[in-house]
Image: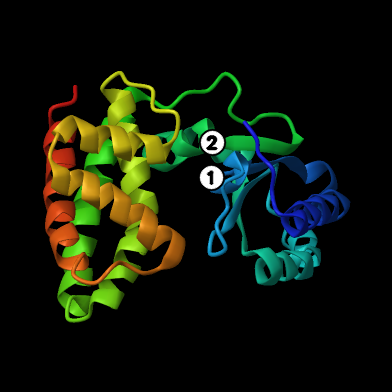
Amino acid sequence: MGGEQPPQVDRMLADFVTAARDTLGADLISVVLYGSAAEGRLRPTSDVNVLVVLKRFELAKVDALREPARLAKALVRLEPMWVLESEIDAALTAFAVKFGDIMHRNRVLFGADPFAGRSVPRTASIQRLRQVLLNLSLRLREAYVERSLREEQLAHVLADFSGPLRTLTAALLELEGSTPSSPKAALESFAAQLGEPRFLELVRAVSEARETGRLHAGVAMPVFHALFELVATLRVRAEALC
C-alpha cells in the first residue's frame, strides 16, 4: 500500500529513518508508516504515524534520537510508537483493533515487515472491538454534554471522533466477513446498509468536519442524534459476533 505524500513529509520521514538507523544501530528492526499517511491521504491536521520496532529500548541510544524525533513532530506531526519486537504478539492481542488497522494500512520504510506471518486472534478482535465501542460511547456522551451549546464545537468533536468511528466500523465489517477498501469506505458501506437518509448525512458531515473543521448551520444537532444511533447499532452488531 502506498500513496504520494507532500514532499516535506517524504523528506522528514527519510531524515527520521536515517537518524534512527544511525543512532539505534542493530537495535532497530523496522520503521513502519501506518494510517492515512500510508494510504497517501494525509490532511493538513493529520498525524504522521510510524511504528518503530526495536530489539531493545536502550536509553542512551534513544536519547540521541530525541532531537530528530522532536523536529519531525514539530514540522510534520510525526508520532512514533516504540515497540519491542518481543512485544508484537502481545500487542496484537491487547490492542487488536488498533493493530488490525495498522496491519491493513502500512508501508515499511525500513527493515522487515514485523507483521509477516502474524495475525490478530479473532477472539481478541471481538473483545477489543466491544471494549473500544463502549469507550467511544462514554467519550461521545461526555463530549456532547460539555460542548453541545455551540455548533462549531460539535463540528470539532465530530472531526476528533471521525477516525476512530471509521476504524471501528471497518473492524466490525471485517469480522462480519466484508472487506472494505478503507475505513472511510467501511463507514459509507455501513450507513448504506442502514438505509436511512440521516445516516448518509452523518457520513457526509463526518467528511466535512474532518476536512474543514466546520459544519453547515443547523446540521450538527441532527447529525449527533444520528451518530449516537449509529454507535449504538455498531455495539449491537459487535455483541452478536462470535
Quadrant where the C terminus sits is top left
Quadrant where the N terminus sits is top right
x 30%, y 76%: residue: 152
Q: Residue furthest bottom?
A: 149
Q: Residues within 10 Å of mark 2 (few under 14, many from 20)?
A: many
Q: Is 92 or 227 nearer to us in this picture?
A: 227
x 18%, y 75%: residue: 148
Displayed quadrant of residue 6:
bottom right
Mark 1 belongs to which amino acid? Gly
Q: Is residue 3 above or below residue 162?
A: above
Q: How many marks?
A: 2
Q: CA distance from mark 1 to mark 2?
A: 5 Å
Q: Is residue 57 above or below residue 155?
A: above
SS of the residue under disc 2: loop
x 38%, y 22%: residue: 179
x 32%, y 21%: residue: 178
The percent coordinates of residue 120 (x first, y second) are 42, 27
Q: Is residue 97 above or below residue 20?
A: above
Residue 96 is tagged as none
Image position of 26 (left or right of 43) = right
Displayed quadrant of residue 39:
top right
The percent coordinates of residue 171 (x first, y second) are 34, 34
SS of the residue under disc 1: loop
Q: Is residue 81 visible?
A: no
Q: Could you tell me if the residues under marks 1 and 2 are in contact, i.e. CB atoms within 8 Å?
A: yes
Q: Which residue is mark 2?
A: 105
The percent coordinates of residue 38 (x first, y second) are 61, 41
Q: Which residue is mark 1?
A: 35
Q: Is residue 165 visible?
A: yes
The percent coordinates of residue 214 (x first, y second) are 36, 69
